[in-house]
């Protein structure tokens, strides 16, 4: 029992100063990226943009460390999914995001990568959250999510 408690306790080691996302710099860069400037025509945003600050993870069942910042926008759209994915494929490339090799069932990129000033690499993903095949004209719910790594002890 003592061993289990010792393994799950925080030994008092906190984050190194200057790590994470000081001043929310990366979070702010993600949230103002042009990819988030507009939704597809006819789409409706669900709630407001979620800005998730970097958070230090204390050891328990995972090692201690940082989870980097992220930005998430949820929206619904009754257009065919091909139209939504086509819209974001074009807009992502225009905003400097490069498509990764993985594709969804429609053949569109599911994720993109972008190098920001300071040479850090962010990831962007678009997910159709609809668990069923919608009838024509029935809205699908989508999540557009961008995430960045936390700043490490070397300032990267």
Image: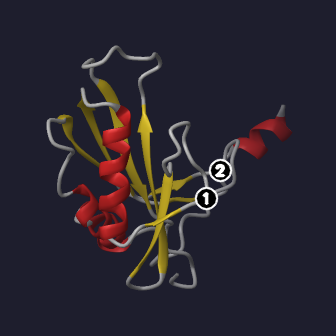
Q: Is residue 155 above or below residue 66?
A: below
Give how far across and how far down residue 59 sits, in percent.
65, 50
Question: In the image, 88: left or right of 118?
Answer: left
Ranked by sequence position, the earlier of labels 1 and 2 is 2
Residue 143, x across and y down, in percent: 36, 39
How packed mark 1 is, by other alpha carbons closer than 10 Å (few <14, some 14-19, many 20 or more), is few
Q: So how many labels did they put on this image?
A: 2
**In this rendering, position of residue 116 left or right of residue 45:** right
Q: Is residue 26 left or right of residue 61?
A: left
Between 58 and 122, which is closer to the camera in this rendering? 122
Return the mark for residue 59: 2
Q: Position of residue 5 (x, y in %)?
A: 75, 38
Q: Residues within 10 Å of mark 2 (few under 14, many from 20)?
A: some
Which of 27 and 111 lies nearest the eye of the viewer? 111
Residue at x 36% of width, y 46% of height: 144
Residue 23 is left or right of residue 20, and the answer is left
Nearest-to-viewer mark from 1 and 2: 1
| Picture disc at residue 101 | 1
Give the distance between the C-alpha atoms of the residues marked 1 and 2, in whole angstroms: 34 Å
Question: Residue 148 placed where, x, y %?
Answer: 45, 64
Question: Within the image, what quadrant is residue 55 found in?
Answer: bottom left
| Quarter of the rendering occupied by the N terminus | top right
């Amino acid at each position: 029992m003592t061993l289990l408690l010792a393994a799950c306790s925080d030994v008092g080691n906190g984050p190194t100063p200057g790590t994470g996302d000081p001043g929310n710099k990366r979070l702010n860069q993600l949230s103002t990226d042009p990819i988030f400037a507009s939704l597809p025509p006819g789409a409706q945003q669900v709630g407001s943009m979620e800005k998730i600050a970097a958070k230090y993870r204390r050891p328990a069942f995972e090692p201690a460390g940082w989870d980097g910042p992220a930005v998430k926008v949820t929206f619904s759209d009754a257009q065919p999914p091909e139209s939504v994915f086509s819209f974001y494929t074009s807009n992502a490339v225009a905003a400097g995001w490069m498509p990764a090799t993985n594709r969804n069932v429609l053949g569109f990129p599911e994720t993109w990568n972008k190098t920001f000033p300071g040479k850090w690499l962010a990831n962007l993903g678009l997910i159709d959250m609809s668990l069923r095949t919608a009838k024509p004209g029935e809205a699908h719910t989508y999540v557009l999510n961008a995430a960045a790594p936390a700043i490490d002890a070397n300032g990267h």
